[in-house]
Image (cartoon, rainbow, N blue to C red):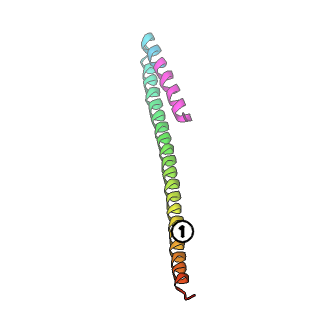
Amino acid sequence: MNNEQVTGKIDQVTGKIKQKVGEAVGNDQMANRGVAEQVKGAAKETWGNAKDAAHDNKEAVRSEHESRAADARDKVVEKVQDMKRAVNDKIDEHRDRRPA
């Protein structure tokens, strides 16, 4: 949980309290400020959620990239080994054909 999510939740709770107190004592201005604070808190929390999602996506992309890079390296190494074997097999064939 990041800072925006925490402060957003706190703002929402504080706003709800202000709203209820304002309504209880008949102070519309206080009740309205409480609702405004809830809206502000919800926006902060949503921004924090978006930041977390972006961070998680970045990590997933990096992990996928690293996995693909490792697979590509493994394939290159495998191809090099295949070519080396093929060349050595041809060399051995030619050695075997030499007259004794």
- SS at mark 1? helix
Please provide percent x and percent y for residue 83. 51, 73
Residue 1 figure quarter: top right
Q: Residue furthest front?
A: 100
Task: Report the quarter where the C terminus lies.
Answer: bottom right
Of residue 95 and residue 38, the one placed in the foreground of this image is 95
Give the main secondary structure, helix, strand or loop, of the magenta stretch: helix
Magenta segment, which residues? Answer: 1-17
Which percent across, then down, holds residue 70?
53, 57
In front of the other: 100 or 92: 100
- Count residues near mark 1 (Cα–Cα under 10 Å), then give few for <14, some for 14-19, many for 20+: few
> Quick check: is 83 in the magenta stretch?
no
- Quadrant hosting residue 77: bottom right
Q: Does residue 9 show up magenta in the picture?
A: yes
Q: Is residue 3 left or right of residue 40?
A: right
In the image, residue 40 lies at what x, y percent? 46, 31
Amino acid at pointer 1? Gln
Relative to 80, residue 19 above or below: above
Q: Which residue is mark 1?
A: 81
Compared with 24, 43 (above or below) is below
Q: Vertically, is 21 above or below 93?
A: above
